[in-house]
């Protein structure tokens, strides 16, 4: 009895037999879209055609697709792998990143073996997103970077701009803002050199850059880009792109101290997102809107808590652990403003537990809320420790403006607890983060020290 040939070789043998019957060379079968070497690999059983390649082959060979598909086992067929990708996506959306990661990894390996480049890229992108949603940001960033660096990335089913947006998001959460800004600008410059028309992903990347500049404290640049994003989005039919542009413009206005201008922009974004079916994005936008409500001059804690409760309900089913953590931090701030420090501590600690060790920026912000709650309950030492941890995290993240705010919060806490000398030190740290080097004071300090050494009166000009 003849030994059964592997299924991949059976497919290759059938392609070779049909080609020879048609009197075609490998070059003729390859046509303009494939290469003769790729056809050779197919016939040798070392590649399995993607659905698009299979369609081209059957058209040139004059046979039905099923005539070739029957040579493949069920687990090797591209539509089976595509179905498994859809199941993994559902797991990811349902807040099950570990299950999604397992499926994506399996599909990626099978697709790589079968030679399905597009399926492999989609699975790799999905695996990176699953890692990101699990809080494994360094690993996720490595996966996104490998996709971005892949020579075939421009021909992949995963858009390069989508990978860039995701990678910038990871760098932002890790706290590497300089790298994130450099990457976003690089990819945007590439798109402009290629004279690509504005796209939804292009506006999303531009909006991401707005957020990055905002985090770095470059509010002038952020505001300029936010206006550009709105202009580009208004020329598109996609409402989500316009909503994202208004969202980021609102955040910039708030960071620039114009909460009265920020709220209408965020409300317009909310109205746009409410028309769509992206429950997760709408919930995250509610978090941002509530944060501005809580930080405005006349904080509307009741409306903010209402928005956050709706957000929490949606994120419990649609969001990641990080999304939920952002909501918990905002709820902690709301409880603190309502003079409920115990409720604030409960939500802040829950947020810190969800954030883990990777999300430096949000961890720092949560620690500041926790410090405020600890101060309310008389835990001065714990409050000081929380605030110092926050300030150091922000400073290490290259977010000078945010670090300055944290040191300022610490200074006020120290002042309230009677630690005047330490408070002065913290205020100076805040000014240093804002670039206040104090050249004049340094020169005067040297001159005063010199005079003190000669026992001269400070007012003596001789």
Image (cartoon, helix red, strand yellow):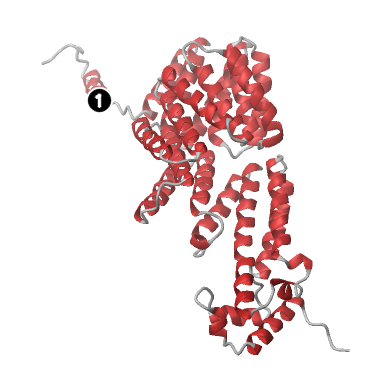
Residue at image x 63%, y 85%? 19
Q: Position of residue 312 (x, y in %)?
A: 67, 27
- The residue pinned by badge 1 equals 446
**Residue 380 appears anywhere in the view:** no
Q: Viewer-proximal residue, 222 or 432?
A: 222
Q: Is residue 308 above or below residue 340?
A: below
Place residue 214 in its image quadrant. top left
Quarter of the picture containing the N terminus is: bottom right
Residue 182 seen in render: yes
Number of numbered discs visible in the structure rendering:
1
Near-viewer residue (136 or 80): 80
Question: Is 179 displayed left or right of 119 in the figure?
Answer: left
Can you give x and y, in whole percent of width and height, for residue 232 in the image?
A: 40, 40
For label 1, the crowd category at 10 Å Cα-Cα, with few meaning under 14, some 14 to 19 and many 20 or more, is few
Looking at this rendering, what residue extends furthest in the left direction? 462
Q: Position of residue 10 (x, y in %)?
A: 74, 80
Q: Is residue 146 above or below residue 400?
A: below
Name the residue furthest right: 1
Residue 428 in the figure: left or right of residue 409: left
Give the quarter of the figure containing the C terminus.
Answer: top left
**Residue 433 on image: x %, y %:** 39, 29
Q: Is residue 186 left or right of residue 18?
A: left
Q: Residue at x 67, y 33 (%)?
A: 354
The residue nearer to you, when weighing 106 against 263, is 263
Identity of the residue drawn at 54% across and 57% down = 147
Tell me the SS state at disc 1.
helix
On screen, residue 320 above or below 20? above
């Amino acid at each position: 009895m003849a030994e059964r040939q592997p299924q991949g070789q059976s497919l290759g043998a059938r392609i070779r037999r049909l080609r020879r019957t048609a009197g075609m060379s490998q070059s003729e079968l390859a046509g303009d879209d494939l290469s003769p070497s790729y056809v050779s690999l197919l016939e040798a059983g070392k590649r399995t055609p993607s659905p698009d390649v299979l369609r081209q082959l059957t058209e040139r060979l004059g046979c039905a697709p099923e005539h070739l598909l029957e040579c493949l086992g069920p687990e090797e067929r591209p539509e089976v792998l595509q179905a498994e990708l859809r199941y993994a996506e559902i797991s990811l959306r349902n807040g099950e990143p570990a299950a999604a990661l397992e499926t994506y990894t399996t599909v990626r390996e099978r697709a790589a073996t079968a030679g399905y480049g597009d399926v492999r890229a989609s699975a790799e992108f999905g695996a990176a997103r699953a890692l990101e949603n699990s809080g494994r940001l360094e690993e996720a960033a490595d996966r996104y970077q490998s996709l971005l660096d892949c020579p075939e990335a421009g021909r992949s089913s995963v858009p390069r701009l989508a990978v860039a947006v995701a990678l910038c998001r990871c760098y932002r959460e890790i706290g590497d803002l300089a790298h994130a800004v450099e990457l976003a600008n690089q990819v945007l410059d590439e798109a402009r050199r290629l004279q690509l028309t504005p796209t939804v992903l292009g506006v999303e990347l531009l909006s991401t850059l707005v957020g990055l500049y905002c985090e770095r404290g470059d509010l002038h640049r952020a505001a300029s880009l936010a206006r550009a994003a709105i202009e580009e989005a208004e020329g598109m039919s996609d409402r989500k792109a316009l909503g994202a542009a208004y969202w980021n413009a609102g955040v910039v206005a708030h960071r620039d101290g114009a909460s009265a201008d920020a709220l209408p922009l965020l409300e317009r974004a909310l109205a746009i997102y409410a028309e769509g079916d992206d429950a997760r994005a709408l919930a995250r936008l509610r978090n941002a809107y509530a944060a501005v409500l809580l930080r405005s001059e006349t904080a509307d804690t009741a409306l903010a808590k209402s928005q956050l409760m709706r957000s929490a309900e949606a994120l419990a089913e649609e969001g990641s652990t990080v999304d939920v953590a952002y909501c918990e931090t905002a709820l902690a701030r709301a409880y603190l403003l309502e003079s409920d420090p115990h409720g604030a501590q409960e939500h802040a600690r829950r947020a810190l537990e969800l954030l883990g060790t990777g999300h430096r920026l949000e961890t720092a912000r949560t620690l500041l809320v926790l410090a405020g709650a600890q101060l309310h309950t008389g835990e001065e030492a714990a409050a000081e420790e929380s605030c110092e941890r926050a300030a150091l995290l922000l400073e290490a993240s290259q977010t000078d403006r945010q670090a300055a705010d944290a040191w300022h919060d610490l200074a006020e806490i120290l002042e309230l607890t009677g630690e005047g000398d330490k408070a002065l030190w913290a205020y100076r740290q805040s000014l240093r983060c804002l670039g206040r080097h104090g050249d004049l004071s340094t020169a005067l300090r040297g001159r005063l020290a010199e005079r003190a050494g000669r026992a001269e009166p400070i007012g003596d000009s001789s």
